[in-house]
Image (tube, grey):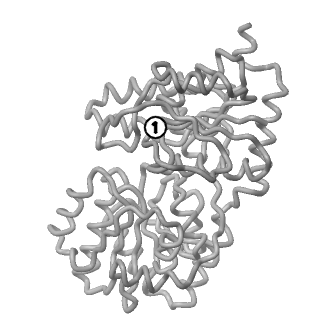
Amino acid sequence: MKIGQFGESFIPVFDGVGRVMKAYAETMAKRGEEVYVITPMYNTGYRGGLPYEIVDFNSVELSKKIPWRIGLDSFDPHFIARMKQIDLDIIHVHGPVFAGNAGLNLAKKRHLPIVGSFHTKFYDDILQFTGVKTIAKVGSQAVADFFSKCDEVWAVSEGTGETLREYGYKGEIIVMPNGSNRRVLNVARVPEVRQKYGIRSDVPVLLFVGQISWKKNLGRVLEACSILKKQGTAFQLVMAGRGPDEQAIRERVSELDIADVAVFTGHLTDTESLDAIYSIADLFVFPSIYDNAPMVVREAAAQRTPSLAAEGSCTAEVITAGDNGIISKDESPAVAQAITDFLSLPQEKRKAMGDRAYDTIPIPWDGPLMDTILGRYQALIESNNLKYRKSL
């Protein structure tokens, strides 16, 4: 198959959705499929050696508050010329914004089947960017309208699908979870990472990986850590990533008097360093309500590190409390108590929880999951029951 993956972010700077797209492209190419990633251009740096082709269009930065760049493919003649030479069989869009609309327009023009994956809580993003609830509501309705034009709509979790329905989407939704490969830890990197970032070995390590943004519920994490410190609990909080609220979060760390137990590593592009940090951590603290099917929880589990998730969140869907992770109410004292209870467990029970996380949470990309994805692609290609073919 000749497959087009369309998304708003990719190499060299990409968010969770971009990482999902990268896994799709790599795994499909490994299976012999011809894969093209269509995305806004970030830079023209060397990207040789990839088993798939990146076809990008001119773009500009919209705001420091969001990780995407914007651009209109229809105003980039070089991109248009390149796309004319690519004969796709199916289009898969991973969002309803600029690259997503490029995919939708191409599907309509060429009468191709199109799959739409819903990953992100756009209402929250639009509200954060504009501060106006009416605009966020109108924007979320536009998101629902976009997905109603796709032949199949996939959501990365049950809760994610419910969010799309809240936006106004009324069609069928197929839950297609994200995968996460279990990578072999390079143990030699562990002491290097400890030394580089000052991660202690004599106290429990709490870890957060992701955008350094308030929408990730980091305020809850910081307040819980302040409570732990006041109670005399020995620990270290490591935050890996970068984001629009980093300066404000650093200031909050100082206000809460936890700067001496907090470490900011910045953005980690080296997979081995990231895996080392996951393996060092005793508990991955991720009480985000915003995230739908975070890759980071799966990556932590792949290094046998259990996670703390907020009750009722999409993240909590993969966690069985006390078995492969812990679940807390979305309240700072409750998060602090859940961490205390976990750290009070005997070491063998904490290790058993990490082992269960390893056994139950990561789903390998290249296995039954990819069989299902490619099978649905093939069925759509062979079907005549497609929106844009019907309109002929």
Question: Where does residue 252 sit, x and y in percent of width and height?
Answer: 19, 63
Q: Quadrant of residue 385?
A: top right
Secondary structure, mark 1, is loop
Image-based side of 225 in relation to 25, left or right: left
Q: Quadrant of residue 94?
A: top right
Q: Is residue 334 visible?
A: no
Quick one: which residue is furthest to the right in this view?
382
Image-based side of 324 in relation to 110, left or right: left
Residues 105 and 307: in front is 105
Residues 150 and 287: in front is 150
How packed mark 1 is, by other alpha carbons closer than 10 Å (few <14, some 14-19, many 20 or more), is many
Q: Which residue is mark 1?
A: 41
Q: Quadrant of the C terminus?
A: top right
Question: Where does residue 183 sit, x and y in percent of width and height?
Answer: 63, 70
Q: Quadrant of residue 150?
A: top right
Q: Amino acid at mark 1?
A: Met
Question: Where does residue 204 sit, x and y in percent of width and height?
Answer: 40, 84
Residues 293 and 289: in front is 293
Quick one: which residue is furthest to the left in this view?
255
What residue is at 67 percent from the left and 52 percent from the top? 26
What residue is at 52 percent from the left and 31 percent from the top? 99
Q: Is residue 307 above or below residue 344?
A: above
What residue is at 59 percent from the left and 77 percent from the top? 185
Question: Where does residue 145 sit, x and y in percent of width and height?
Answer: 53, 22
Q: Quadrant of the N terminus?
A: top right
Q: Is residue 1 above or below residue 85?
A: below
Residues 248 and 82: in front is 82
